[in-house]
Structures are given as structure tokens and as C-alpha cells.
Image (tube, rainbow, N blue to C red):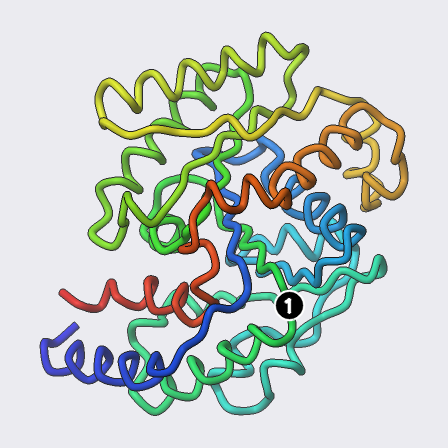
Amino acid sequence: MAKDQAVRLRNVVKKNMQHNVPGARILTVTSGKGGVGKSSLAVNLGWEMEKRGKRVIIFDADFGLANVEVMFGKAPKHSLLDVISGNLDIEEVITESPYGIRFISGGSGILGLNDLDPLQLHFLIRSIRRLNGLCDILIVDTGAGISHQVVDFVAASPEILIVSTPEPSSISDAYSLVKATLGHPNFVRDDSRLYLVANKVSSKAEGEAVFERISSAASRFLRTGMDFIGMIPEDPALEKAVRRQQLFCKAAPSARAALAFSDLAQVLLEDSFSKKSGASSYFGISGFLNGILHRSKG
């Protein structure tokens, strides 16, 4: 991007960020590779938080794959692209799933956020700021891997939930994602927290072993700490619900994995944990977007 365009974009962002107040909590769910249950975690976590009285919106940032809408079994009529084009307001692109959970489809064109002209960017930021009044928690479901589009979202997030299974390739890819995130110019260690969720584990010991392998490497080679936020046991009922496009925690609330999702949601919402996470977790949606757009700074 040309230098003068980068300057214009930064000026637009700065103007729109003035008088910003703390807003929705941002939880970003991500993984170093696909097939580890990332989107399932995002959807079921959202459901459990809704049950506890929180207004949740899931932002499907896995562009091109649309996993969230597939899991809900409902294709949205509109996406964030309709907001960028000025055809619709942000409220009009929020889709309600058959289970009452709301979600937003990003649309493949969001890959060109940094190519928007200042007028489009101004309108988009003002629109997304309005989500602060529409939800308490925004769950961002990123794509898998360490591509720029994934790491840009992860590095801009105050609370990052990295999902890994016990498979050696999943553990290795999760570490690679941590490394890429820490190396991103927009990542601020003091304002962000890295959590690990061990998925598809056979026991508590196996879940703890997954965390130990990733966190030990991150501490030794990257000089960063991680928190073990929880584990989800391997459960045939979960795989069955995914194939049937059913919301697992509603279809089988007493299943082992469903109880684990419930525990995970409770831990994240506990006052003591929220305070431990730091006030930066609540800097608002526009602050999150600003972090993503700051990549145009160079």
C-alpha cells in the first residue's frame, strides 16, 4: 500500500476511535491447523454463554469456508460486504441461527480491508462500533493456520483461545501459531492473553500433557506464558451432532463434552478470572478492528 494511502487510513481510524468507550468482550478462537474442532468450540461456547445471560454474536472470520453457518445449518442472506458497500446497516447482516445464537458472515471480500478507500473504511468502522450495544461478547472464529488473514485477527485480540488436539501435528502447528502471533507487529504482550484448550482428549492427564508441550516450548523459546483454560474430551456424540448440523450442547446437554463446554464457559465468565485477564479484554469492538487495520501502517 502506498505511504499516502496508509496515512489516510490511519487518520480515518484515529478519528473514528475518538471517544471510544469499553464495549463488548472479544474472544478469538483459533487453531494452527484445521479439523481440531475450533468452530465447534466457538459455537458451543457461545451457546453456553447465552444460557448464562450474555448477549453473544459469533463473527465467522473463516472466510471462504463458512463453518459457523454450516454448523448451524443456515446460510445467511447477507455478509459484512453488504455493509462495506453501503447497501445494509450492520444490524441487517446479523443472522439468527435456528438456536437463537446470532452470527455475522464476513464474506470473502473482507480479505481486502486494507484496500478500502477512506470513505468506505470510515463507514465500516462506525458500523461495527454499533455492535458494542448489541452484544456483551463477540466470539471471533478465525480460519486455521498461520496465514496473514488469520494472524492479523489473532494478534489484534485481547483474549486468544488456541485449540489443539493431542496429535503431534496439531501441537506443532499450535506452537507455530503462537510464534507467528508473537512476531506480529501489532501484538502487545502486556495487553493480550493466550489460552489453550485441549480438544478431543482421552483423559485429564492427556489434556494437561498437550498444554505442557506447547506452553513449555513457548516459555523456553518465545519467552511467553500461556494459561490452560480447559479441555474437551473426545465424545462420539459430538461428532454425531456435527454431522447432523445440530447444536451439540443443546442436543446432548448431559454428554461429557457438553459438560466440558459448560465448565469452560463458566470459567471464562467468572469474575475472578475476568479480573485476572485484565481490563484490556473490554476495549471494545472498534478497538479490535483498529488492531486489524493497523497492519496498513507499513
Residue 134 percent across, percent down from the top left: 65, 74
Write the residue at 59% across / 8% down.
205
The one of 169 and 56 positioned closer to us in this rendering: 56
Q: Which amino acid does label 1 sit on?
A: Cys
Write the residue at 54% across / 16% down.
166
Write the residue at 43% across / 72% down.
286
Write the residue at 55% across / 30% down.
229
Q: Locate residue 90: give its quadrant.
A: bottom right
In this rendering, would 262 be left or right of 10? Answer: right
In this rendering, would 99 be left or right of 231? Answer: right
Q: Callout 1: helix, strand or loop?
A: loop
Q: Locate residue 88: give its quadrant.
A: bottom right
In this rendering, would 24 be left or right of 257? Answer: left
The one of 284 and 272 positioned closer to us in this rendering: 272
Residue 14 percent across, percent down from the top left: 27, 80
In this rendering, would 106 be left or right of 54? Answer: left
Judging by the rendered image, the residue that carries numbered circle 1 is: 135
